[in-house]
Amino acid sequence: MSQSIDGSNKAALRIMVRQVGKSLGGLDAVVDATGVEAVRGIAEPIAQREMARTGGGVYVVADDAGVVVSAVAGEKPQP
């Protein structure tokens, strides 16, 4: 499951993270592939709070969204 929203909109981000957490029965990890430092400052505390509901998790910052997409698709990274 994935969703896309304006990461600078704190209310929308909080609602989206909560909805995803509820539909999946909790979150083990959240991947931030925005590459925008300001989004991390908003998103990480919200994600950590949601992950704490079910025992914690990890917040991953990926500076290159293309690498994340390739990894999820099962593609091997190009040297």
Image: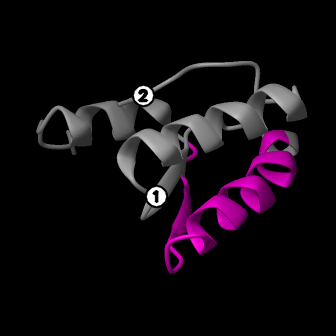
Query: Label 1 to label 2, Cα distance in Å?
Result: 12 Å
Apparent side of residue 41 relative to residue 14 in the rendered image (left or right): right
Report whether 35 appears left or right of 26. right
Task: Say what amino acid the circle numbered 1 marks.
Answer: Leu
| Magenta residue check for 49 | yes
Nearer to us: label 1 or label 2: 1
Q: Is residue 71 left or right of residue 20?
A: left
Can you say which quadrant of the picture contains the N terminus? top left
10 Å neighbourhood of mark 2: few (<14), some, or many (≥20)? few
User: Quick one: which residue is furthest to the top in this view?
Assistant: 5
Q: Which residue is mark 2?
A: 2
- Which x, y percent locates residue 34? 64, 33
Position above or below: 53 against 36:
below
- Residue 16 x/y as whole percent: 64, 31
Determine the secondary structure under disc 2.
Answer: loop
Residue 64 to residue 55: above or below: above
Q: Which residues are magenta?
A: 39-63
**Residues at badges 1 and 2 in contact (C-beta under 8 Å)?**
no
Instruction: Name the residue: 51% across, 23% down.
Output: 3
**Residue named by callout 1:** 27
The answer to which image quadrant residue 33 occupies is top right
Residue 63 pos. (x, y %)? 58, 45
